[in-house]
Image (cartoon, rainbow, N blue to C red):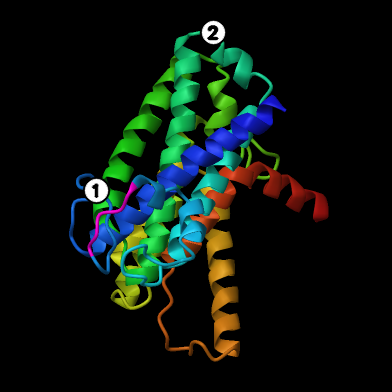
Amino acid sequence: MPFFWSYLFVFLIGSIIGSFLNVVVLRSEKNENYLRGRSYCPYCQKTLSWWQLIPVFSFFILKRKCYYCKHKISWQYPIVESLTGLVFVLIFWRFTRFPFFLPLLNNFTLESVLILLNLIFWFYWASVLIVIAVYDLRNYLILGEIIFPAIFISFIWKIIQGLYLYFFQGSFLTFVNQPLGESSFFFGYWGYFPSLFYGILVGVAPFLLLVLFSRERAMGWGDVLLALFLGIILSWPAVLVALILSFLLGGLISLILIKLKKKTFKSYLPFAPFLCFSGLVVLLFGDIILKTYFLLI
């Protein structure tokens, strides 16, 4: 039962973050500062009260209409808020399923601080992927002001983690660092920094080649940056699993849309949402997916 309240609390925090992510997407489209100014109705410009901003619930309390101008409110708001809350819960679950997680946090040590920071970074990475996916779905464009700092901050964090793991062997941080673990009988053992290097290389290389050979018709430079970000946060071999999953998912959805006559073979379909979704799936369930796959073959 205590875990239920913990998960509920994490979901509420996630849904609040999701509400902010909607603000980031919508204000970025208008070149507005999403860190300053109160929330307002995009149609009548009226400033919204606190009770109109409760994540998920306000959407249904207001019956999907602005309180002032009665204009329809987009389903994007509750979907992104609920999705972010759910992803935050899954991230929290992934950390708490390690038996050492909660006992370790009861002792204030450098390692416990790093693991807690790791959890916060996972929340941050999930938020970045959700923003990128939603913005690309709406505008067919990767949001540079989000992806550039995310790449820089994440790379610095991964270097800090690697140095700690290098000097303190046997750290619990090893178990939460990589979604697929440090080793597997299929991919073999890879040290931290080689894994990070090959993750970046494998993540960027195919998209860079597609951009250069297609002259940006098949992929754009934004996709290269997103692949770089995934290579950093997932490392090798997890990034390879994410890329394979994204291409399979993208191909399947494309065929379904063509079959339903919603798209044609010449239509453009944003690829970032598939990359973001696959990255989240591997981040959360990469080890489970791989073990299940090996059991089936």
Indicate the quadrant where residue 16 lies. top left
Q: Quadrant of residue 283?
A: top right
186 above or below 144?
Answer: above
Pinpoint residue 215: horizontal percent, then vertical percent: 28, 76
N-term-proximal mark, 1 vs 2: 1
Whether 201 is drawn above or below 2: the answer is below
230 left or right of 240 in image: left
Q: Which residue occupies 57% across, 61% down? A: 244
Quadrant of the image occupied by residue 222: bottom left
Residue appearing at x 36%, y 45% in the figure? 50
Residue 235 versus residue 45 in the image, above or below: above
Between 97 and 168, which is closer to the camera in this rendering? 97
Q: Residue at x 34, y 37 (%)?
A: 155
What number is the disc on residue 38? 1
Task: From the viewer's side, name the closer residue of 193 and 271.
Answer: 271
The amino acid beneath tag 1 is: Arg
Q: Outermost residue, front direction?
A: 68
**In x, y percent, where is residue 269?**
43, 76
In the picture, the disc for residue 107 is 2
Task: List x then y, in percent, for residue 25.
Answer: 32, 58
From where the camera sits, is residue 284 visible? yes
Q: Residue at x 32, y 54 (%)?
A: 23
Callout 1 crowding tier (Cα within 10 Å): few <14, some 14–19, many ≥20: few
- Quarter holding the C terminus is bottom right
Identify the secondary structure beneath mark 2: loop
Q: Which residues are magenta?
A: 45-49
Instruction: Indicate the position of residue 157 as horizontal and vertical percent values.
Output: 36, 31
Magenta-span inclusion, residue 46:
yes
Circle 2 crowding by C-alpha within 10 Å: few under 14, some 14–19, many from 20: few
